[in-house]
Amino acid sequence: MTDKPTALDLPPVDPLPEATARYFQICEEKLGIVPNVLRAHAFDIEKLDAFTALYNTLMLAPSGLTKLEREMIAVVVSSINRCWYCQVAHGAAVRALSGDPALGEAMVMNYRVADISPRQRAMLDFAAQVTQASASIEEADRAALREHGFSDRDIWDIANVAGFFNMSNRVASATGMVPNPEYHSQGR
């Protein structure tokens, strides 16, 4: 396997700005790796900063959705889009956060067979609809989420997490982004 995060020849800024180097060090400390998606963006620090700011607010900021639920959305969207990088990386996150390797595998293969709550199923059905046919979403689809206890803010978060991963899946696939090897063994 190559050390390059993508199939493109875009070397990182060298040296990395102090704030970026510090962010990568935090990743190493917390995750044991610098995710290749971050390494891939490091040729353009402004774009890296924009990407990480959006990712961090969608995936880590307070929300009515749990961190696990947001990762589940990431995996379902990535599975539909067949994004190798995100299926591997976020599948590992689902396994680690849930403590259930089978759940991570089900999210990647077919979330409809997973042992999840009706609430989570409704959330993932909506994320799948955002991915496959967002123009078909109507009030009845949002009402179905409300019936499962999702607030309008939660619906906003579901749509935004799904939208973000639809965008990042396309970039990862188009650039041949390679998952970090460590993801394959995490949470198993």
Image (cartoon, grey):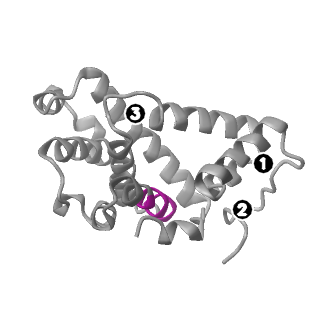
Q: Is residue 16 above or below residue 6?
A: above
Local crowd size for mark 1, using a 10 Å CA cut-off: few (<14), some (14–19), many (≥20): some
- Give the spatial CA distance, label 1 vs label 3: 26 Å
Query: Residue drawn 15% across and 27% down?
Result: 146
Q: Is residue 89 magenta?
A: yes
Q: Which residue in the structure is indicated by mark 1?
A: 43
- Give the spatial CA distance, label 3 vs label 2: 28 Å
The answer to whether the residues at label 1 and label 2 have Cβ atoms under 8 Å apart is no
Comparing 98 with 36, the one in front is: 98
Query: Mark 3 or mark 1, which is nearer the start of the sequence?
Result: 1
Q: Identify the disc placed on residue 8.
A: 2
Mostly what secondary structure, the magenta segment? helix
Which three-letter amino acid code belongs to the residue tagged 1?
Phe
Report whether 54 appears left or right of 161. right
Comparing 125 with 105, the one in front is: 105
Query: Residue drawn 78% across and 48% down?
Result: 43
The image shows residue 170 at horizontal and vertical percentages of 50, 52
Quadrant for the N terminus, please: bottom right
